[in-house]
Amino acid sequence: MNSTLKRVLGVTGSVALGIAGALTFASAAQAHHVEIVGTATCADDGWTVTWETTDWDSQNVGAGVIETITSNGELSGDIVEGAELPHPSTGDKLIGTQALGFDETVASIQIDAVWPNGHTGTGVAELPQPEGGCDEPVDPAPVVDVGASSDCFGLEILVTNQDAERTVEIGLQDSQNEYGDWYYYEVAPGDTLTEYFANDPELGDLAVAVTVDGEDHGTFEWDGGTNCEWGYVTDTCEGLDLELTIPEDGLETTYTFNPSNSDEETVVTVAPGGTEPVSFAAGDDEEFSVDYIIDDGKSFYEDTLTWTKPADCEEVPTESESPSAAPTLPTTGSSMTIMISAAAALVLAAAVLFMIARRRKAAGNW
C-alpha cells in the first residue's frame, strides 16, 4: 500500500514540475515586451481611446524600438513606427489616441518592438466602450412655433423659427392644390414665415399640411372664419341700397365707402347686433362704382362695388295733355347677404356684388 502511494505522489510531483517549467520558460521568453494601458472616452462623432505605452525590460539591454503597429481605428500621437519605448523608471510614456465610430464596440491595438540584443516582443490590448456605451448624439428638434388663422376667405399659416442658431426648412401643402405639390421655405433664426391660402369652395375643404425639417408638424383646417356677414345690397334703377348688418356674436365694424361719382366719403360704424342703411345714387350716370373697406379691428378687407343701369329701367315720360297712368320704375336685383362660406359662396357667386375679394394683413393679433 505504501509503494502505491509513493508512485501516485511521484506522478503528481512530475506534473507540478512540468507546469512550473512551462511558466518559467514563458517568463523568460517575455523578458522584452511592450506595456500598454488605455482609457476610453465618448466623443461627439464616436469614441476615443488614449493609449499609453512603455518598455518592459528586465535585462537592461537598451530601449526597444516599435517596428509595427496594428489597430482597428485611426491612431495619432507619439505611438509610431520607429519610436523608442521609454523605460518605466523614467516616468515617460508614448501616448497615442485611437478614434473609433459608434459602431465599433471594442478598440484593439498591437505593438511589435525589437530590442538591441535582437529580441522581439509584442504588446496587445483591447478596450470596450466606456460603461453604458457611447450613443450617437441626436440633434434636438428645432424650436418652431406653428399657428394658423382662418378668415372669411382662406387660411393663413404663420411659422416662427424660435431657434437661436438653426435655419429650418418649412414644407407646406395645400389640400386644394390639384397636383398635391409641396412648397418649401427656409426660415432663418428669429424669422417668421407667413403664407396665405385662399379657399375655393368648389375644391373641397381647405387644409394645409406643415412639415419642419421633413418631420410632420400637423395639418391645419380652414374653419370658415368668423364675422363673415356684413349686410345686404340691393341693385336698383336709382343706384345701390345697402343694409349693413353685424350679427350679435360679431365685432364692432367700421365701413368706409368712396363712390366714384362723388368726392364725399361715407363712414359708418355698426355695433354687434346692429343694422345701418346706406344708399348711393347713380344720378345721371349709366354706371358708377363704390370702393369700400370693412374694418372689424382685427382685420380689414377692401374691394369695389360696381353698378350698371339695368336694361329694363324705363324713364318716366314727361306729362302730356292727355293724362295717363304713370309707369313705375322697376327695381332689379335682390337682397343679397354678404356671406363668405363654403356653401353660400357657391349659391351667391354669380349674383352677390357686395363681396370681399381681397384680403389685407391683420391689424391685430390672431
Image: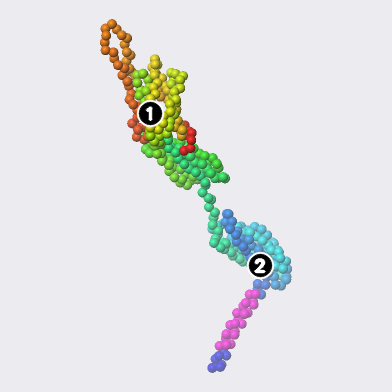
Chief SS of the magenta region: helix
What colouring style does the render use? rainbow
Give the structural element (helix, strand or loop) at label 1.
Answer: strand
Identify the residue under disc 1: 275
Find residue 312 and report its horizontal and vertical position in percent.
Answer: 31, 18
Magenta segment: does it hold 10?
yes
In the image, is 194 to the left or to the right of 232? Answer: right
Quadrant in which residue 7 is drawn = bottom right
Dot 1 surroundings within 10 Å: few (below 14), some, or many (20 or more)? some
Q: Residue at x 55, y 90 (%)?
A: 5
Find residue 97 and report its horizontal and vertical position in percent.
Answer: 63, 59
Which of the two residues, 1 or 212, is positioned nearer the viewer here? Answer: 212
Which of the two residues, 19 or 162, is positioned nearer the viewer here? Answer: 162
Quadrant in which residue 279 is drawn = top left
Find residue 100 and report its horizontal and vertical position in percent.
Answer: 58, 58
- The amino acid at mark 2 is Val
Which mark, by number, is residue 364? Answer: none
- The amino acid at mark 1 is Thr
Identify the residue under disc 2: 34
Q: Residue at x 57, y 87 (%)?
A: 9
Q: In whole angstroms, how far apart are the C-alphas of marks 1 and 2?
A: 99 Å
Say above or below: 103 vs 335.
below
Q: What's drawn in magenta, residue-wise?
A: 8-27
Quadrant in which residue 75 is drawn = bottom right
Find residue 341 and report its horizontal and vertical position in percent.
Answer: 37, 34
Q: Residue at x 64, y 57 (%)?
A: 76
Give the structural element (helix, strand or loop) at label 2.
Answer: strand
Which of the two residues, 191 or 203, is positioned nearer the viewer here? Answer: 191
In the image, is 99 to the left or to the right of 259? Answer: right
In the image, is 263 to the left or to the right of 237? Answer: right
